[in-house]
Image (tube, rainbow, N blue to C red):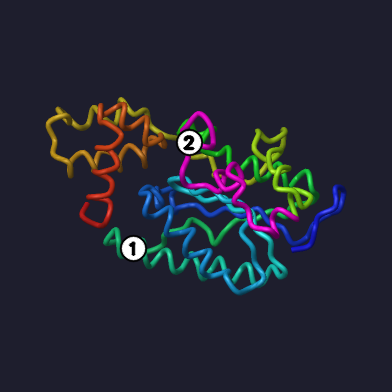
Amino acid sequence: MPRVARNEKISKYYHIMVQGINREYIFENPEFKKQYISFFKKRIKNIGIRLIAYCVMDNHVHMLVFSDFIEELSKTMSSVNTKYAIYYNKKMDRCGYVFRDRFKSEIIIDRKHLENCIKYIHNNPVKANICKIPSEYNYSSYKDFLNKKIDNDIIYLLCDGMIENSNRLLGKEDEGTFIDIDDKLEFEKPQNVLKEYNNFEYLNKEGIYIIIRDLKKRCNISNKEIADLLNIKKSSFYNILKEYGSGKV
């Protein structure tokens, strides 16, 4: 990857976002989040694309990538999304489209934009009220930057060749606009949805999982908020997702 000068315009660095069709939570399980990034990393291993930063949320993914050719990046996104769609449909015992669009992208225009994009991507879980600080979220590249486990090319690109300089990439981004999920859809109040499930506290795990799916789709709230609403411990909540999030509902 070429080094980026402070005021140099860039044409090979892209902020990429993919989203579940109808804003569905196609990455809700930890396994799903890890699998998508795994598919992407394997696909780009020996081609001219580098993954610089990423964050996998429940219904969308942000990535900052370097690519010599936009055509190759398009092929890569098509390949990865197709592979993940097959994987997800098999897991969820469903068929049809998984992603809302092929993918969205924006070109990174300069060094400041590049650094802000990294911060923006890593702060997604905080803005969604999933965690208080980025380091509490396990499905992004933030900890790689925090623990200085960035590979040499990225150190050279982002940190002027000095790993210590990576600290400047750990804060909040400056004011700016980046591609994000479409917020035009209106969502229901969780309390109104729960009224449809009388005595839900007496339901078995499978019944609770159905409510979780319904709350996610209709209310667009975080896992923590759902667990609190249902008065379920975090460990029990994710055990339910793991047990019933593979096509049994």
- The dot on residue 123 is none
Q: Residues within 10 Å of mark 1 (few under 14, many from 20)?
A: some
Pointers 1 and 2 in contact (C-beta within 8 Å): no
User: Helix or strand or loop: what does disc 1 sit on?
Assistant: helix
In the visual, does 180 lie left or right of 11? left
Q: Does the magenta stretch include residue 96?
A: no
- The dot on residue 89 is 1
Residue at screen point 36% across, 38% down: 218
1 or 2: mark nearer the eye: 2
Q: Give the range drawn in magenta.
A: 131-156
Residue at screen point 57% across, 53% down: 17
* Quadrant of the image occupied by residue 156: bottom right
The answer for how far apart the CA atoms under marks 1 and 2 are is 29 Å
- x, y percentage for residue 242? 27, 49
- Which residue is under mark 2? 136
Q: Quadrant of the N terminus?
A: bottom right
- x, y percentage for residue 231? 25, 26
- x, y percentage for residue 38? 47, 62
* Quadrant of the image occupied by residue 201: top left
Q: Which amino acid does label 1 sit on?
A: Asn
Q: Does 97 sit above or below residue 186?
A: below
Residue at screen point 33% across, 63% down: 89
Quick one: label 1 or label 2, which is nearer the N terminus? 1
Q: What residue type is labelled 2?
A: Glu
Q: Residues within 10 Å of mark 2 (few under 14, many from 20)?
A: some
Q: Residue at the far bottom: name it.
A: 46
- x, y percentage for residue 28? 38, 47
* Quadrant of the image occupied by residue 107: bottom right
Number of labels in the image equals 2
